[in-house]
């Protein structure tokens, strides 16, 4: 454990940090999640079998995918979901990088990033990003990049339209809602590369599939997927 500086102790005293899951004050030695919430985080275990798990099977036959994993099982209205809601809807961008780092550290234990050339966050439309102030997936990627040293690519694919949120939609509605919303903007940076697509939550895989299909048009592209949460259908 790294020694804690006097400045860190002072900052923690003046502006105490809060666990985004249970809302309790973090100890100065705790990072992002308190020890109890970290211990009880409903982990998927997908890093142990990234080629064959519930998440990977959702994408089989839709896109050629090499590895898939999510850090935890996402249940709407649960305490764990609070961290994601705060990141996406309550102006807490700092959680993106922090949660990305947590996911990356766990994935590194299983050599999940072996052979990955670039990290590609699922893009937002410019309008949506202006409204939110940031793209949460880019922040998650920033945390992953910090832990792994793998560079991010945010220019290859763009989201051209945002129809509406996927949250309350059925499986078929989700597929239709993302049809044609992504566009391959710059093929050269990703051609011949193994890309890790990064999203916050995966439910049906519709968004990931639509984005991956555009990236595959660049040619000689390999796709893997990492998300913070996975919703069991």
Image (spheres, rainbow, N blue to C red):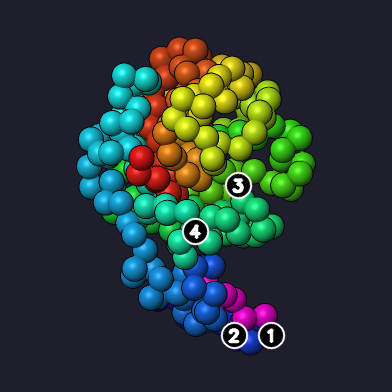
Q: Secondary structure at mark 4?
A: loop
Between marks 4 and 2, how big is the CA–CA gap? 33 Å
Does residue 163 appear in this view? yes
User: Which span of residues is magenta-colored?
Assistant: 14-19
User: Which of disc 2 and disc 4 is earlier in sequence?
Assistant: 2
Is there a contact, CB below 8 Å, between mark 4 and mark 1?
no
Report which quarter residue 86 is drawn in.
bottom right
What residue sits right under mark 3 in the picture?
A: 136
Q: Quadrant of residue 230?
A: top left
Q: Which mark is residue 14?
A: 1
For the residue pair 66 and 44, the one nearer the viewer reads as 44
Q: Residue at x 66, y 28 (%)?
A: 163
Q: Nearer the viewer, residue 166 or 151?
A: 166
Which mark's residue is nearer the viewer, 3 or 2? Answer: 3
Residue under label 4: 77
Relative horizontal placement of residue 181, taking residue 112 as reference (left or right): right
């Amino acid at each position: 454990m790294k020694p804690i500086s006097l400045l860190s102790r002072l900052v923690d005293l003046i502006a105490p940090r809060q666990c985004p899951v249970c809302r309790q004050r973090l100890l100065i030695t705790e990072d992002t999640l308190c020890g109890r919430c970290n211990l009880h985080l409903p982990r998927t275990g997908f890093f142990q079998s990234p080629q064959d798990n519930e998440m990977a099977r959702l994408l089989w036959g839709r896109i050629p995918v090499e590895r898939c994993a999510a850090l935890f099982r996402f249940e709407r209205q649960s305490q764990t979901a609070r961290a994601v809601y705060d990141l996406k809807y309550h102006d807490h961008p700092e959680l993106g990088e922090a949660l990305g780092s947590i996911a990356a550290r766990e994935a590194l234990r299983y050599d999940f990033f072996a052979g990955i050339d670039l990290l590609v966050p699922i893009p937002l439309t410019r309008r949506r990003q202006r409204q939110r102030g940031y793209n949460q997936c880019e922040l998650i990627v920033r945390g992953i990049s910090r832990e792994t040293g793998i560079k991010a690519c945010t220019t290859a694919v763009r989201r051209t339209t945002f129809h509406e949120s996927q949250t309350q939609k059925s499986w078929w509605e989700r597929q239709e809602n993302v049809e044609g919303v992504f566009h391959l903007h710059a093929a050269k940076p990703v051609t011949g590369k193994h890309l890790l697509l990064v999203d916050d939550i995966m439910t049906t895989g519709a968004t990931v599939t639509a984005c991956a299909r555009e990236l595959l048009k660049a040619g000689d592209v390999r796709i893997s997927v990492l998300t913070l949460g996975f919703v069991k259908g």
